């Protein structure tokens, strides 16, 4: 596939742990979606100076923007449901979403 293309509407499943838990995420994002996510990134990310509340808020935004399904229930999960998860479960999702988001960045090896 060429460099110039419309962003895919496909999704992919990310396994969380070994107990059958998973999230379904958008496998691609458009320039518009990327710009919306970038606008929500906390100040100081490049320097590593992000407060816990800033990181938590961005994690919720990232969840809402990328997650389209999960093993917890059928239908599209909400940010409110995500915020009601145990800390352990939410942290597993956060780590998976951070890796996935990195793969969507324009200069990532997977995104090329």
Image (tube, grey):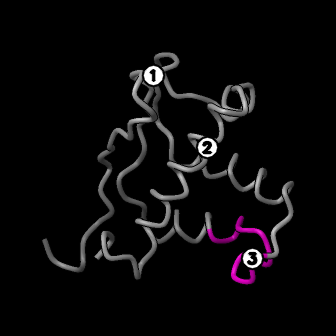
Q: CA distance from mark 3 to mark 2?
A: 23 Å
- Residue indicated by mark 2: 64
SS under mark 2: helix
The region drawn magenta spans: 38-48
Q: Nearer the viewer, mark 1 or mark 2?
A: 1
Mark 3: secondary structure: loop
Nearer the observer: mark 3 or 2; the answer is 3
Let me know if residue 41 is in the magenta part.
Answer: yes
Q: Residues within 10 Å of mark 1 (few under 14, many from 20)?
A: some
Contact between marks 3 and 2 (CB within 8 A): the answer is no
In the picture, measured across the screen, residue 31 lies left or right of residue 82, that is left
Secondary element under disc 1, as helix, strand or loop, is: loop
Decide which of tag 3 and tag 2 comes sooner along the chain: 3
Pointer 3 residue: 48
| Most frequent secondary structure within the magenta stretch | loop
- Disc 3 to disc 1: CB gap under 8 Å: no
Which callout, 3 or 1, points to the residue nearer the camera?
A: 3
Residue sitting at x 40%, y 82% = 107
Figure quadrant of the C terminus: bottom left
Residue at numbered disc 1:
71
């Amino acid at each position: 596939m060429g460099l110039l293309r419309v962003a895919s509407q496909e999704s992919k499943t990310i396994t969380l742990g070994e107990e059958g838990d998973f999230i379904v995420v958008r496998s691609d994002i458009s320039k518009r979606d990327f710009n919306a996510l970038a606008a929500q990134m906390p100040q100081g990310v490049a320097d590593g100076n992000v407060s816990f509340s800033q990181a938590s808020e961005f994690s919720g935004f990232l969840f809402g923007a990328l997650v389209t399904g999960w093993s917890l229930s059928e239908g599209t999960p909400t940010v409110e449901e995500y915020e009601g998860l145990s800390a352990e479960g939410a942290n597993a999702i956060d780590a998976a979403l951070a890796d996935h988001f990195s793969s969507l960045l324009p200069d990532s090896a997977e995104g090329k």
